[in-house]
């Protein structure tokens, strides 16, 4: 039987996730959204692209969660963007309600599903799904770190004129301005980044990485990044469906790793058919530890503003 991935929220990130996933021919796909006709229209359009790209993927769209029955993976991208006059806390609790409903409605139809969360504020929305669903931490994984790391990799590759494949960058921490780019561990074909780039160039790349989301929002004028975030989700889903055991930076519920507890936080995570297989721990120096602690305080504040 074909595997099944349901994507809740058929907006920019949800639909583009479906696109990347269809190209990988990993699973049949379902798009669900509250807007009438939107998931149906986008999924029909994508289905009609399958003969052209030669992939046998069934894609359906619905406003009804019944379509998600028996999913192996549920991706949650549903949410509202921050509107003028809306505080971060307002947005947090509005999106928490949306993510809560998406979790409840999908989990009763797919009791064994692994959840990949994208809705912002990311680390807090992961917490909502885990708590509301009563799920083990292995089955709730947030996408943020692949995106942040990919941005840094892209900037380094551009600067040095080398293939993106040769550039390995690792960004830990919360998905916000306090993220922790690990320049000491990042490298180009095994050579540490600080030996490849002068300090000022490296500092500029770190700064651009931290502000990467905002840079795109400012250019687009409305909406936020969607190609790279959704490509990251597809990579996570592939590692799970194929049991590849890729180690990817993801938001994971920590139970003592990195000295942190009861918090979703960006760390390197091995992903296999059961979801999270293992958290990988880097040896951090004092400066890196201080950055991690600062970032953790921000995520904790966001979680404590939740009204579940
Ligand atoms: N149930 C299902 N879908 C919903 C619900 C709901 N209760 N509420 C909103 N949606 C849908 C919207 O109708 C919209 O189609 O979620 C979709 C969100 O899509 P976009 O507005 O295009 O936003 P997108 O760019 O995809 O980002 C989604 O991911 O990166 C984060 O910050 C971003 O939280 C945001 C989320």
Image: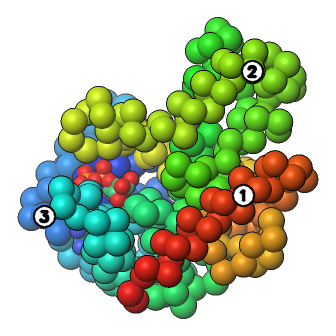
Q: Is residue 265 left or right of residue 277?
A: left
Which residue carries the number 1 mark?
292
- Which is more foreground, mark 1 or mark 3? 1
Q: CA distance from mark 2 to mark 1?
A: 21 Å
Q: Nearer the viewer, residue 286 or 72?
A: 286
Distance (Cα) linking label 2 and label 3: 48 Å
**Residue 35 image label:** 3
Residue sticking out furthest to the top: 161
Q: Is residue 33 left or right of residue 128?
A: left
Sooner in the amino-acid sequence: mark 1 or mark 3: 3
Do residues under tags 2 and 1 come within 8 Å of each other at their CB atoms? Answer: no
- In the rendered image, the quadrant that contains the C terminus is bottom left
Q: Earlier in the sequence, mark 2 or mark 3?
A: 3
Residue in the picture at 18% in, 56% down? 84
Note whether residue 101 is visible: yes
Query: Is any atom of residue 243 visible in this view?
Result: no
Q: Which labelled disc corresponds to residue 199? A: 2
**Mark 3 Cβ inside 8 Å of ligand 1:** yes
Element type at mark 1:
helix
Residue density around tag 1, few if under 14, some if 14–19, many if 20 or more, within 10 Å: many
Query: Image quarter for residue 158?
Result: top right
Query: What is the crowding at mark 3: few (fewer than 14 residues within 10 Å), some, or many (at least 20)?
Result: few
Q: Is residue 43 left or right of residue 120?
A: left
Q: Residue at x 32, y 38 (%)?
A: 217
The count of marks equals: 3
Q: Secondary structure at mark 3?
A: loop
**Residue 29 screen position, x and y as percent:** 37, 58
Q: Is residue 8 above or below residue 208?
A: below
Vertical relation: 252 (above or below) 186: below
């Amino acid at each position: 039987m074909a595997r099944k991935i349901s994507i809740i929220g058929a907006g920019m990130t949800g639909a583009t996730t479906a696109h990347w996933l269809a190209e990988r021919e990993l699973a049949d796909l379902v798009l669900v959204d509250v807007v009438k006709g939107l998931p149906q229209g986008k999924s029909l359009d994508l289905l009609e692209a399958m003969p052209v790209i030669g992939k046998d993927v069934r894609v359906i769209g619905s406003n009804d969660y019944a379509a998600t029955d028996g999913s192996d993976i549920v991706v949650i991208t549903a949410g509202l963007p921050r509107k003028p006059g809306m505080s971060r806390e307002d947005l947090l609790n509005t999106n928490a309600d949306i993510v809560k409903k998406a979790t409840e409605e999908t989990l009763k139809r797919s009791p064994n599903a692994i959840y990949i969360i994208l809705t912002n504020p990311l680390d807090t929305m992961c917490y909502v799904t885990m708590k509301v669903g009563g799920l083990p931490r292995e089955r709730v994984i947030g996408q943020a770190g692949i995106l942040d790391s990919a941005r840094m990799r892209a900037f380094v590759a551009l600067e040095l004129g080398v293939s993106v494949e040769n550039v390995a960058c690792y960004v830990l921490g919360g998905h916000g301005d306090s993220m922790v780019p690990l320049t000491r561990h990042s490298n180009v074909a095994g050579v540490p980044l600080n030996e490849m780039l002068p300090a000022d160039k490296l500092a500029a790349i770190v700064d651009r990485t931290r502000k990467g989301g905002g840079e795109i929002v400012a250019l687009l004028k409305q909406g936020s990044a969607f190609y790279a975030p959704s490509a990251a989700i597809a990579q996570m889903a592939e590692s799970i469906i194929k049991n590849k055991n890729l180690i990817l930076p993801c938001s994971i519920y920590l139970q003592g790793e990195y000295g942190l507890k009861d918090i979703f936080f960006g760390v390197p995570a091995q992903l296999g058919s059961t979801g999270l297989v293992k958290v990988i721990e880097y040896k951090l120096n004092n400066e890196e530890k201080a950055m991690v602690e600062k970032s953790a305080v921000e995520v904790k504040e966001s979680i404590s503003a939740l009204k579940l």
